Image (tube, helix red, strand yellow):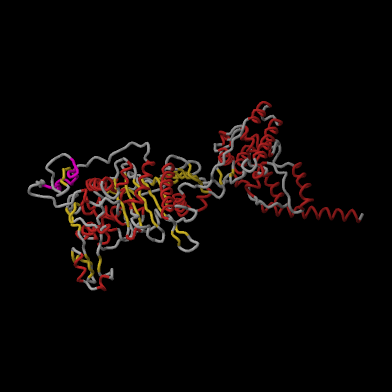
Amino acid sequence: MRIQIRWIICILLVIFLVTVYFRNILKELPSVDSLREYTPTLSTKIYDINAKLITELFTERRSWVPLSKIPIDLQNAVISMEDHKFFSHWGVSFRGMTRAFRNNILRYRKSIAGGSTITQQLAKLAFLSREKTIRRKIKEFLLALQLERNFSKQEILETYLNQVWFGHGAYGVEQAAMMYFQKNTSDLTLGECALLAGLLRYPGYYSPFNNIDRAIYRTQTALSRMHKLEFISEKEKFEAFTVHISTQRTTRTSRVAPYFIEDIRLMLEKKYGDEIIYRAGWNIYTTLDLDMQVKAEKALNDFLDNFDKTHGYKFISSTEVLKVQGALLATDPKTGQIRAMIGGRNFAESQFNRAIQAYRQPGSAFKPIVYTAAIENGYTPTTIIEDAPVVYVNDGRDWRLAAKTTDFLLTLPDKWLKDPMKVWTPENYKKKYHSKVLLRQALEHSLNVCAVRVVEEISPVTVISYARRLGITSPLTNTFSLALGASDVKLLETVRVFNTLANNGIRTEPYYIIRIEDKDGRLIEENRPVEEDVLSPQTSFIMTNLLKGVVEHGTGQYAKYLRRPSAGKTGTTNDFTDAWFIGYTPQLVCGVWVGYDNKVSLGNKMTGGSLACPIWTHFMKEALKGEPVLDFTPPPTGITFAYIDSGTGLLANTTEQSESVYLEAFLKGTEPKTCFIPETTGNILLSPKEFEEDIGY
């Protein structure tokens, strides 16, 4: 009797302890109702202007597909391999649980695995950690029962198929279809469905990328089970056996436009936060043209690779090599949309984006701002400018012109000559001077002294005000050296300036994102061009006409290989440290910069015309291939044309164009009124042949 009482007490004690244990577990269980509002971790997709996928941002790569769009063959294949009684049980398989406990508890004691239904697997995926313990298995059991009471079989299956891991970073059936076959789930064949279903137990082991024979064996096993369960016929099974399944691994890492993507990622993180960007499944539609970006990367990298082979590497130390760097930025002149962006040669080595972060001296690429200000302050394309050596001295308050010849230097104390704070003598490339030139010639051949004289005449303050209007936001020095691009600016800013000239004086802000939609297609953000009318269309037309001359006759002649109407300007800094070319056609604006990060010399005669301009030309040629050859916009009202004698800047006595006669554009009323008469006037300027032929600054 006492023994029976002891047994009863022991049994009651066990029941009490088990009850307490289960009550504690039940308190720890999350509410399965949260699955109705469950938001899976979905990757954010970034697309180009033509809706081509560029890359994804994610912690887990996942896309949600409703069950109605998942092929029935895939549903049945998964059920066959993972839980063939899915539609008949009520959440758990006692036979499977018993087998799992028998095989695992005795062997591993605290560790337990296996025997899970699809519902149990979903409970584990959605609510539980990955630990393999008896306590976790009990939670899985209880949650599965609750899931079956609160959700239909179809809801459970849909959530499971969109949640489960298929290997190689692919979560859910849509990402698995893209990973292994580069197609959407709805386009999968029977054999492909069977292959994916066969992966679920051990994705790495059965992956066709790791072992094709094991993958084929597993696929055949899935097809056989489907046939056994009467999901497919004998004929369908053997047809699927004999069809070759071609897998093609999708490259997940974005190797195209990494600097562009990184800038977008940083902007989105700052604006919306990490949780949204990496988990919400948004779709980001950008301004980038993926095809154009690929061509830009090839043009820049091919040229710089060749530069390294030809000129060798520079060494910072015995173990550290310094490679020449480059940046490229292309925009749509009408909208400001960024079409291509390169911030450096290798994103993995350096994430510093030289297109939008680097401050470098633009050299002569700044001169179009100077001459824009000049045109609006009384100058014309035929204004005669003195091109002779000049000396400026600083009297402690300001710089002033001291003399127009270097003879003046002989009268200065040696200590002044050695002090750049006291004396400044701007020089032309190769120290070549031409006495007197037309404004057009000064710009085409990038004559430094002429640009300085113009800034002296109209004042640096005036030039700075025009720089601000056109798109320069960086600090600018209020000195005459402003004419030679002595102030550091960004490539983004210089491209914005030329974009304004290309867009008839309307400044548009460069931007990346067209619109953002959430996973259900609801609009989150939409961007449109931000425009401001900052320059008259007449001045813009004249400047474009002048910059066309840089390509046709001046320092940017390499761009003639484009064989399209184009305009642009070269830029080179002292000691050949920076090389620039910013140019445009009616369809596209592009800026290129080349240099070393530590601002060492690129080498003798390494100018914007010889380095940056060829990169620009090769890119533009490929980027515009197949596009119509367009000329720039017709002259606006207020523009008049006149035939000019290039030797005097006066009206020509003929309307036949020749080496010495050309057609020039003027603001109406500013054209020359006097005609060139050889017997009385005589040439006061150099002929085009007498100008420096080198591709210079």
| Residue 8, magenta (yes or no) | no
In the orientation shown, which residue stands out farthest toward the top?
235
Residue 591 visible, this orientation:
yes
Residue 464 visible, this orientation:
no
Quadrant of residue 548 within the rendered picture:
top left
| Point 75% across, 44% down: residue | 97
In the orientation shown, which residue stands out farthest toward the right?
1
Q: How many marks?
A: 0
x and y percentages locating residue 321 in the rendered image? 47, 59
Viewer-proximal residue, 694 or 402? 694
Viewer-proximal residue, 229 or 389? 389
x and y percentages locating residue 242 in the rendered image? 65, 29
Viewer-proximal residue, 446 or 459? 446
Viewer-proximal residue, 344 or 207? 344
Instruction: Quarter of the image for the N terminus: give it.
Output: bottom right
Vertical position of residue 351 compared to residue 400: above or below: above
x and y percentages locating residue 377 in the rendered image? 19, 54
Residue range corresponding to the magenta coloring:
657-673
Vertical position of residue 420 compared to residue 580: above or below: below
